[in-house]
Image (cartoon, rainbow, N blue to C red):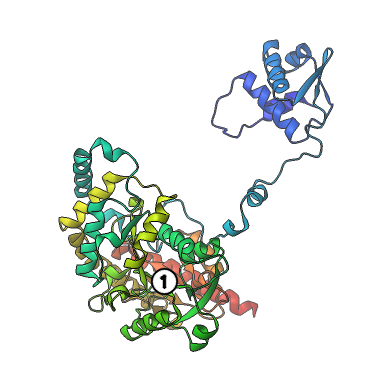
Amino acid sequence: MDYQLLFDQYQPAHSGLRLSQQRRLYGCLREAILNGHLVADAKLPGTRSLAAELNVARNTVLYAYEQLVTEGLLQTQGSSTRVAKGVCAGRHLVDEANSATRAISTRAQLTPWPVDPHGAFTAFMPGVPSLADFPLPLWRRCVERSWRKLSHKQLDYADVAGEPELRSAIADHLTTTRGVRCTAAQIFITDGTQQSLGICAHALANAGNTVWIENPGYGGAFQSLKAAELHVRGIAVDEQGIAPSESDWNNFPPKFIYTTPSHQFPLGSVMSIERRMSLIESAQRVGALIIEDDYDSEFRRDGPPLPAMQGLVEDAPVIYLGTFSKTLFPALRIGFMLVPKGLATAFYGMLRLGHLRGRSADQLALAEFLRAGHFAQHLKKMRRLYAARRDALVSAIEKYLGDSVTIYGGSSGIHLTIALAEQCNDLVISQALLAQGVYAQPLSKLATDKVLRNGLMLGYAQVDAIEMDKYVQILAQVIKAGTVCATTET
């Protein structure tokens, strides 16, 4: 064993740390034992001999040996020091990814596309609002006032349903703007839509029960439902939204249905009033609930938003989900569930068992933001901004891609979708775009069972209108290159 080479080449896990010679020698010997380079019962040099070889103090070697003896990796036999028997028998470096996968349960091993770019700006990232246009000074003042009003009692765990002031403000806002029928007692504050979905998945169905989701649909919903060990059945969507057949209702009745009627994710269709009423009536007939994710309802441009499904009929079998991540900013981490009156008590009792809440100051700040009209004013500004950016994106797509793609979902929301030619591979194109700073989510990865669509999702909220041409040119170049390659291969 070349101990000098071992000592010189040792790289600790945190390579930025400066280690003493004692810690460095201890670390390199420990790693050599654990990865099998120093095998069981191997004899180590004497302390004086190793100190001379490494040009270190003998106390450095003594420290390393003593520490490894304490951990059971070395043992002394008379005057000699040896690797403990059995400690590394059959032990080798294990691939960290495989090891981690084995440690995670099967139901948690879901990897939705694409990989998070860790918060860096990437053109066309869907679901992210224009953060640079958020009125941060105004929000900061609301937060400061909420902290000044906070009592020491509110530093404890909060009510599992959320701060009463925020629940009341949300109820009033929804009644006024979305036509819902509710009281504050039906509102439950969550960390966002994803947590709301997880709660619903565990509260409304048992493992193995059938639930419906749009196909293609929101990958986060699919992940939550699969993690709850539910049987997820994809229901195709058309220009009016989710379109279950009579066969679906008769042969695969669901415990609940997840849908995004205001701006279907990812195709962008708006569910018609007729389809909404039909879905409610059929759900009532089979005893199913509807989870209405009111995704992007605030940003409809072809007329006023259609009223929420929840308010269309008295006691509708609808759980309404909302979030402030798209309208304000994602880091706020505040969403909400609106549950039917008959479920409010049961939900409250369930949440008390394991969903402790806090962050009272943020909730009170948001309540003020709503009550003072700041939220409505911000939405008005964002509607104009997003409309201009949508128009710039559509114009650039028509300019650089022409008839080679079809645009879906541009009438509302903060993303649109383009359908690609059959010979294009949206996965390959998406990866190529990501390398150039363009994040376009492939539709094929949003299918719940079989691939029904081939295209890309383009979020435009963060891209300035004047920069839209630049990014669409990159998009067009990659798509055309992918089309040529596919054509050549065939």
In this rendering, the answer to whether 261 lies above or below 35 is below
Residue labelled with disc 1? 265
| Percent coordinates x, y for residue 253 in the rendering | 51, 79
What residue is shown at x 26% (from left), y 56% (from top)? 167
Question: In terms of image quadrants, where is residue 85?
Answer: top right
Label 1 sits on a secondary structure element that is: loop
| Percent coordinates x, y for residue 380 in the rendering | 19, 65
| Percent coordinates x, y for residue 386 in the rendering | 28, 67
Q: Quadrant of the N terminus?
A: top right
In this rendering, the answer to whether 206 lies above or below 215 is above
In this rendering, the answer to whether 83 lies above or below 59 is below
Q: Is 96 placed left or right of 4 in the picture?
A: left
Q: Residue furthest bottom?
A: 246
Asked if residue 134 can be seen in this view, the reply is: no
Q: Residues within 10 Å of mark 1 (few under 14, many from 20)?
A: many
Question: In terms of image quadrants, where is residue 294?
Answer: bottom left
| Percent coordinates x, y for residue 230 in the rendering | 55, 67
Q: Amino acid at mark 1?
A: Phe
Q: Quadrant of the C terminus?
A: bottom right
